[in-house]
Image (cartoon, helix red, strand yellow):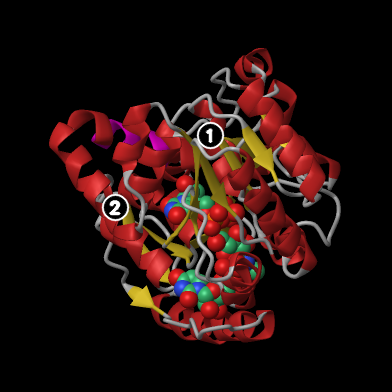
């Protein structure tokens, strides 16, 4: 019986680790599966735990409003010291590029516990973009013994850094496992759709508006390197677009980070634009439901760059770099940075030029077949 501890703390990590927890739980004779959440995010993490019905064994509950990188890093490190000392797992699995992953990996290393890195090997090769995530990935990659890469591109990045081939397994991204699970749930339970629409309405958007041939642009943003001027430019572009296209709904579920909300308040103020709808973060089921109904997505999110191409939704990425070049190559994702004019012209082109839109909206899924978690668990069964 192997003791496996999965550690995560933010919304995207939870979405991508939840199906892995479920898969490990399918093998109670092989594994004692322990879930430790840091609570780096609170409400946004809990939304995902509720959806997947995961009750963590340990919860460090570290979130403080407006916490900075020093706070998060040190609290994760100290918190994990306690938990690891008590549990003494054989393996610790962390995910991706957050402060939770890097400092949990470091905490495990300090007790010489073997670390497995899920979503390993993504690189922009620019340590300030995304910041601090690119460095987090590098550091976690150095600490980890086993690397679960979503694609062969990410595997090659690790090989170039000297990681041995036999320590890397290409699995696809577990986000696709999660996405399929949610899509399946939406399709299977018709009655659920009313519930989802009700929950979206409660967050502030009436999906029924789309029944009158209105189009929907879904927007999210939260990257630290865009704080300040970048976010103001993004907001100015969205404002101009909402005024230019009154028959299109611009729906923006706002991240809870106060640095994201400040420029929104500054640019939009009290004067409301009827088709510019700011709403609270959606729980994952509702978000995917809206994503399916959207015409295109404007985002700086990593996970959404992986989900949207599978649904045939063009994604304009409000960043200058991406560690996910696969969909860029497939032509369904485009980098627009935070330049207002560029954002306005690219969105306009997609709304007005149907040939251009059709070219970008081909469904393609370079990020996996929904079996990533199974491959990771099989790997540990054979360890
Ligand atoms: C973090 C990750 C980033 C990931 C993002 C996903 C790091 C360095 N950054 O960034 O890689 O893409 O999560 O969303 O690990 N807050 C709440 N409630 C919540 C969540 C956040 O109030 O449920 C507020 C708090 O004031 C918190 C702030 O947002 O202090 C920032 O959260 P933090 O986890 O530090 O950074 P993110 O920008 O969310
Ligand atoms: N998401 C969600 N509700 C929202 C916005 C996003 O459930 O209101 C999901 C989205 O589908 C994706 C993940 O959250 O799976 C992305 O999280 P985020 O953008 O915060 O982080 P990133 O992927 O950039 O690390």
Q: Say which quadrant the N terminus sits in.
A: bottom left
- Mark 1, secondary structure of its residue: helix
Residue 288 in picture, x, y percent from top left: 40, 41
Position of residue 180 relative to residue 354, above or below, is: below
Position of residue 383 relative to residue 229, above or below, is: above
Residue at horizontal 59%, vertical 46%? 242
Mark 2–mark 1 Cα distance, whole angstroms, equals: 22 Å
Tell me: 50 left or right of 59: left
Tell me: 304 left or right of 179: right
Q: Earlier in the sequence, mark 2 or mark 1?
A: 2
Chief SS of the magenta region: helix
Residue at horizontal 70%, vertical 66%? 224
Residue 126 can be seen in this image: yes
Residue 317 in picture, x, y percent from top left: 69, 43
Which stretch appears magenta? 178-185
Residue 19 in picture, x, y percent from top left: 37, 46
- Check disc 2 and report the residue beneath it: 201
Q: In the rendered structure, find residue 170 and report the number of the disc placed on it.
A: none
Residue 325 lies in quadrant: top right
Residue at horizontal 61%, vertical 50%? 301
Label 2 crowd bin: few (<14), some (14–19), many (20+), radius 10 Å: some
Tell me: 314 left or right of 84: right
Residue 271 in picture, x, y percent from top left: 54, 65
Position of residue 53 relative to residue 336, above or below, is: below
């Amino acid at each position: 019986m192997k003791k496996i501890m999965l550690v995560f703390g933010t919304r995207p990590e939870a979405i991508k680790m939840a199906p892995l927890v479920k898969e490990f739980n399918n093998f109670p004779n092989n594994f004692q599966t322990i879930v430790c959440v840091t609570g780096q995010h609170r409400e946004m993490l809990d939304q995902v735990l509720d959806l997947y019905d995961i009750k963590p064994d340990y919860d460090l509950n570290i979130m403080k409003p407006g916490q900075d990188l020093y706070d998060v890093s040190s609290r994760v490190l100290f918190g994990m010291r306690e938990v690891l000392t008590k549990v003494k797992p054989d393996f610790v699995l962390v995910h991706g590029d957050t402060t939770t992953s890097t400092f949990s990996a470091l905490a495990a290393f300090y007790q010489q516990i073997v670390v497995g890195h899920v979503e390993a090997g993504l690189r922009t090769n620019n340590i300030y973009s995304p910041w601090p995530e690119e460095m987090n990935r590098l550091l976690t990659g150095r600490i980890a013994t086993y690397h679960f890469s979503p694609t062969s591109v990410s595997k090659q990045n690790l090989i170039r850094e000297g990681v041995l081939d036999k320590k890397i397994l290409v699995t696809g991204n577990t986000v696709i496992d999660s996405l399929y699970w949610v899509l399946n749930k939406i399709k299977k339970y018709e009655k659920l759709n009313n519930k989802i629409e009700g929950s979206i309405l409660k967050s502030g958007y009436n999906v029924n508006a789309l029944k009158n041939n209105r189009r929907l642009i879904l927007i999210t943003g939260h990257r630290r390197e865009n704080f300040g001027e970048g976010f103001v430019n993004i907001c100015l572009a969205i404002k101009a677009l909402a005024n230019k296209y009154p028959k299109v709904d611009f729906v923006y579920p706002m991240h809870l980070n106060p640095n994201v909300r400040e420029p929104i308040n500054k640019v939009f103020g009290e004067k409301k634009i009827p088709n510019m709808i700011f709403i609270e973060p959606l729980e994952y089921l509702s978000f995917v439901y809206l994503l399916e109904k959207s015409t295109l997505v404007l985002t700086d999110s990593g996970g959404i760059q992986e989900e949207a191409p599978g649904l045939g939704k063009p994604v304009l990425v409000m960043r200058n770099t991406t560690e996910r070049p696969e969909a860029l190559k497939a032509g369904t994702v485009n980098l627009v940075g935070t330049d207002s004019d560029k954002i306005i012209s690219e969105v306009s082109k997609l709304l007005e030029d149907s040939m251009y839109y059709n070219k970008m909206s081909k469904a393609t899924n370079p990020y996996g077949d929904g079996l990533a978690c199974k491959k990771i668990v099989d790997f540990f069964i054979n360890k």
